[in-house]
Image (tube, grey):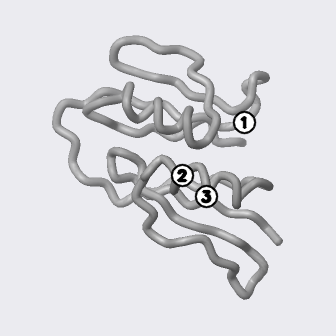
Amino acid sequence: MRIKCVNLISENPERLADFYQQVFGASVTSPIPHRYELSWDESGTSAGISIIKCEKREPLDCFIEFDTDEIDKVYERITEQGYNIVEPIKDLPWGYRYFVVRDPDGNTVDVTHKL
């Protein structure tokens, strides 16, 4: 069994899709008026994100986690673009480097790299 996708709801799915494209390099695989499907894998074997339009979004307590070998470059790109850094980049005693950012809808995004 594997995760197919993470579903996010948004009042502005286009803006949220742009964030994941610009910051994390996603590709839009199927833009339709009420939904954007994003992927990082052309073969379709890894999980993606579906962003679904919802007029009245309730605050959610959820987060997405990305792992990257280029964590410092990603952090630099995010800070240059002015996104809301929740926790600045740091090394953890158990061998990970990470930081936390909020996407435009307020979802928490953890970015990690195993040292």
Residue that mark 1 sits on: 46
* 26 and 36: which is toward the camera: 26
Q: CA distance from mark 1 to mark 2?
A: 24 Å
Task: Answer above or below: position of 8 versus 109.
Answer: above
Q: Which type of secondary structure does the marked residue at label 2 adopt?
A: helix
Tags 2 and 3 in contact by the CB under 8 Å rule?
A: yes
Extreme-front residue of the structure: 80
* 17 and 82: which is toward the camera: 82
Select label 1 or label 2 by which is in front: 2
Circle 3: residue type: Tyr
| Residue displayed at 78% across by 79% down | 95
Circle 2: residue type: Ile
Extreme-bottom residue of the structure: 93
Q: Please state, as top left, top right, bottom left or bottom right, where the N terminus lies in the image.
A: top right
Please state if 113 lies on the left or on the right of 61 as rendered: right
Q: CA distance from mark 1 to mark 3?
A: 23 Å
Residue that mark 2 sits on: 78
Extreme-left residue of the structure: 56
Task: Answer above or below: position of 106 versus 36.
Answer: below
| Residue displayed at 51% across by 56% down | 79
| Residue displayed at 65% across by 52% down | 74
* Residue 40: quarter of image: top right
Q: Residues within 10 Å of mark 3 (few under 14, many from 20)?
A: many
